[in-house]
Amino acid sequence: MTYDANKHLVSFHDDRVFVTEAEQGTYRARRKANRDRLKAGLEKDNEPQPSEHVQQGSYAMETMVKSETETSDIDDGAVFTRESLKGDRGGDKSPFDSKEMVRKALASGAAFKTPPEVRSNCVRVFYNDGFHVDVPVYRSYEENGVSVKELASSTWVTSKPEDITNWFKGQVTDKSPDTTNGRQMRRVVRLLKYWSKSRSSWNMPSGFVLSVLADEAYQIGGWKDRDDQALLAVMRQIKNRISIDEKVYRPVSPRDEITSARTYSRIQKMKDELGAAISELSRIERSDCDELMALKALKSVFYTDYFDARIQELEEGGGGGGAKGAATPKQPVDKRGGSGQYA
């Protein structure tokens, strides 16, 4: 018999993890400003305009989380027709030249403290508060009646950014036992991402890698009305899985590896820290677990002050059992999370 900490965990998710529609205003404003800057810069340089923009990453998958230790990494792809990406002699522009074209346009007419940079798979735009926007550059064309997109990387690589978003949304819908509050599988992914960013000293895998591993670990049908059990089970399964194989692959074609020798240390770090988190969270399975023990476990896992008021109330003998929401703090606390940073 487990202690039901679901209401406490859902309350924490809603208050400290979930990025509300209103809070996404920063993203929307900077996305629009970025697109406007790109359009104006390309026009000034007499370069082609994007045929479309592609939202991708955590915003498109609805898995953005608040974070005290890490600022946003938001992807907003710019797609150009292949025909428009031509060099002076009529040949196709190289991936680097295409990214450099976008970088130059984004830098035009703006006083950035840190200028936009060409990265391996994108152009990165930096903001003074740590927020940054990644702009992957794509070219598109028709081949045998099929629309093709290629990402500007070290070479032009076939890529369909919409496929990842559609895959994830489909998995969430097919597997989750509920239809509200983002659905359980998505909430578990958000909780995992928040946990992975809860300590500034940690260097964990990307949100994409976490999402793929969570999908592999999350069972069809989920755990109805028990996000606490769902999170614990997924953590255990991920730990077992990466103990056997630390390589993670794209869930859609092309099924390339999304980890590498450079990032295996992050997988190892996650495995080690999952051991500690599972040890704490598994307290809900103890026969003697009560509300106080469960709240202390959640506090430890997420490194948060969110449950402090209720813990203090219980320790002082002023509260009973049962999974109640967090009480209003009786004194100032050093808040974590909800800092206006999203990842």
Image (cartoon, helix red, strand yellow):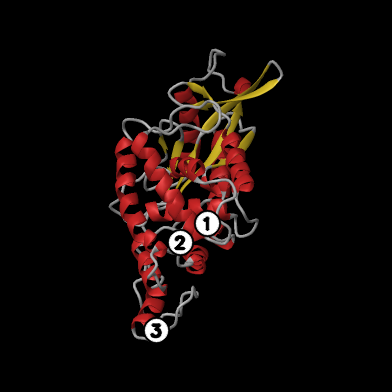
Question: Which element carries disc 1, helix, strand or loop?
Answer: helix
Mark closer to the observer (1, 2): 2
Q: Is residue 49 left or right of residue 318?
A: right
The residue that disc 2 covers is 340
The answer to whether one can see residue 29 in this image is no
Question: What secondary structure is marked by label 3?
Answer: loop
Look at the numbered discs 3 and 1 and tell me whether their residues touch, using CB distance below 8 Å.
Answer: no
- In which quadrant of the rendered view does residue 79 lie? top right
Residue under the point 36% across and 55% down: 278
Q: Which residue occupies 63% across, 56% down?
A: 178
Work out whether residue 306 or residue 216 is closer to the camera in this orientation and state it. 216
Secondary structure found at label 2: loop
Q: Earlier in the sequence, mark 3 or mark 2?
A: 3
Question: Is there CB contact under 8 Å for labels 1 and 2?
Answer: yes
Q: Residue at x 45, y 51 (%)?
A: 233
Give the mark count. Answer: 3
Q: What is the three-letter code of the residue carrying label 1? A: Thr
Place of residue 342 in the rendered image (x, y in percent of width and height, measured from the top left)? 46, 55
Identify the mark nearer the N-term, 1 or 2. Answer: 1
- Up/down of 184 relative to 247, above or below: below
Q: Which mark is residue 26?
A: 1
Amino acid type at image mark 3? Lys
Q: Earlier in the sequence, mark 3 or mark 1?
A: 1
How dense is the environment of label 3, judged by Cα within 10 Å: few (below 14), some, or many (20 and up)?
Answer: few
Judging by the rendered image, the residue that carries numbered circle 3 is: 330
Query: Alpha-carbon neighbours of circle 1 within 10 Å: few (<14), some, or many (≥20)?
Result: few
